[in-house]
Amino acid sequence: MKSPKKLPFSDELAERKGDHIELAKRARTLSSEIDLRFNYEPLFFSHPSSSDSWKTSFLGFEFDYPVWISSMTGGTDHAKNINENLARLCGEFKLGMGLGSCRSLLTDRSRLNEFAVKKFMKDSPLFANIGIAQVEELVINHSEFLIHEMVKMIEADGLIIHINPLQEWFQPEGDRYKLPPIETLKRFLEKSTYPVVVKEVGQGMGPRSLRALLELPIAAIELAAFGGTNFTLLENMRGVKDETREAFIHVGHSAYEMVEILNALPTRNKEIIISGGIKSVLDGFELKSKLKTNSVIGMASGFLAPALKDYETLRNYFLGQREALLTAKSLLELREET
Ligand SMILES: Cc1cc2nc3c(=O)[nH]c(=O)nc-3n(C[C@H](O)[C@H](O)[C@H](O)COP(=O)(O)O)c2cc1C
């Protein structure tokens, strides 16, 4: 097996050949294991170099790679570090990012430094984030200006509104909607002057909701689909177990299903952040290739563990993702029948 110290070339070759003989018996696959999503086209491929990119325009910004860091944190003691690391990554590699809920800033600026990371992002987009329950409360009280002030305070380029009725229902201290979110959104959008993105938080949305969103004057939809982090499950773990509610944990729509629904609808130039359970670069690449509308690939939890460590760890994690994404782009093509 590979020895740790550098060997002369002929010894290294001999060692590698030895490894091949030893491992060949175990390194076997079955034809039934082929990934049938892609055609593999090695004749048109060269290995990506560090200067290669996948230029993408999204939300009016130029990205070097079609990658979005989905909304995660703020309002906790780790948040400043996590958000700064994520924002630096976006600045270095020209990616976009949504902050976690900025609710605390509506009434108190003491945690502003956890969200004020635009300075690390250079020209990349940073979006503030708020739940529909807070939007509803402020719309009812004619106090939407507090949200506009918050977006300005963070120097954000726009706002993400998350719609999470199941999470709120499961959360012991959760909010209750008085208006259907579509009503709240319509009323809020009448007066907002910056781009708005609407998302779920890990359950996705069905065709009727997607169709309604596509008709609103919003800039993009983030899928935040079922199949990854599930906040209904998470809140169920935090709160009192309730078997009647538990059945709702498994309702929702996968990113795959949502892409199919969107492809069947008139998308009216809306852009899409494909997210929720994107566990591998190939999953993201497949869905991006499938979706007919302009899109980027979003991930939340995948970025969290490396961002919690330090910038170098996060950067190395992204370099791996970047290489895999560029490799997929030039080596694979979606099979027509999938
Ligand atoms: C630690 C954590 C905190 C999150 N907080 C928020 C939030 O404040 N607002 C929001 O819109 N989504 C939030 N999300 C949901 C994500 O943006 C995303 O929609 C969801 O995690 C699915 O993506 P994933 O499967 O890649 O994790 C959070 C996710 C994680 C993992």
Image (tube, helix red, strand yellow):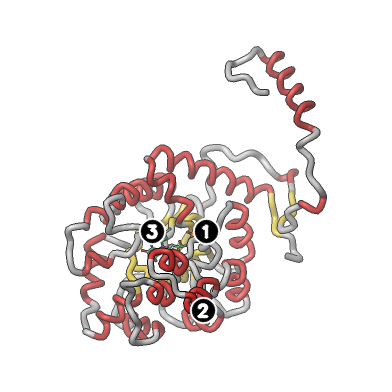
For disc 2, does the CB lie below 8 Å from ligand 1?
A: no
Q: Residue at x 63, y 72 (%)?
A: 260
Q: Residue at x 41, y 67 (%)?
A: 235
Q: Amino acid at mark 1?
A: Ile
Q: Amino acid at mark 3?
A: Met
Q: Residue at x 58, y 57 (%)?
A: 284
Q: Is residue 279 left or right of residue 81?
A: right
Looking at the picture, tell me which residue is in the foreground, 100 or 68.
100
Which circle's residue, 3 or 2, is located before the other in the chain?
A: 3
Residue 3 placement (x, y as % from top left): 62, 19
Q: Is residue 196 visible?
A: no
Which residue is label 3 attached to? 72
Q: Is residue 242 visible?
A: yes
Which residue is label 1 attached to? 297
Looking at the picture, tell me which residue is in the foreground, 63 or 250.
250
Which circle's residue, 2 or 1, is located before the other in the chain?
A: 2
Which residue is label 2 attached to? 210
Which is in the foreground here, disc 1 or disc 3? 3
Viewport quadrant of the N terminus = top right
Q: Is the residue under label 3 in contact with that under label 1 (CB below 8 Å)?
A: no
Mark 3, secondary structure of its residue: loop
Q: Is residue 8 above or below residue 141?
A: above
Q: Amino acid at mark 2?
A: Leu
For disc 1, does the CB lie below 8 Å from ligand 1?
A: no
For disc 3, does the CB lie below 8 Å from ligand 1?
A: yes
Q: Residue at x 54, y 76 (%)?
A: 267
Q: Image quadrant of ligand 1?
A: bottom left
Report how far apart the C-alphas of labels 1 and 3 lie in the structure.
15 Å
Q: Residues within 10 Å of mark 2 (few under 14, many from 20)?
A: some
- Determine the image quadrant of residue 11: top right
Residue 240 placement (x, y as % from top left): 39, 70
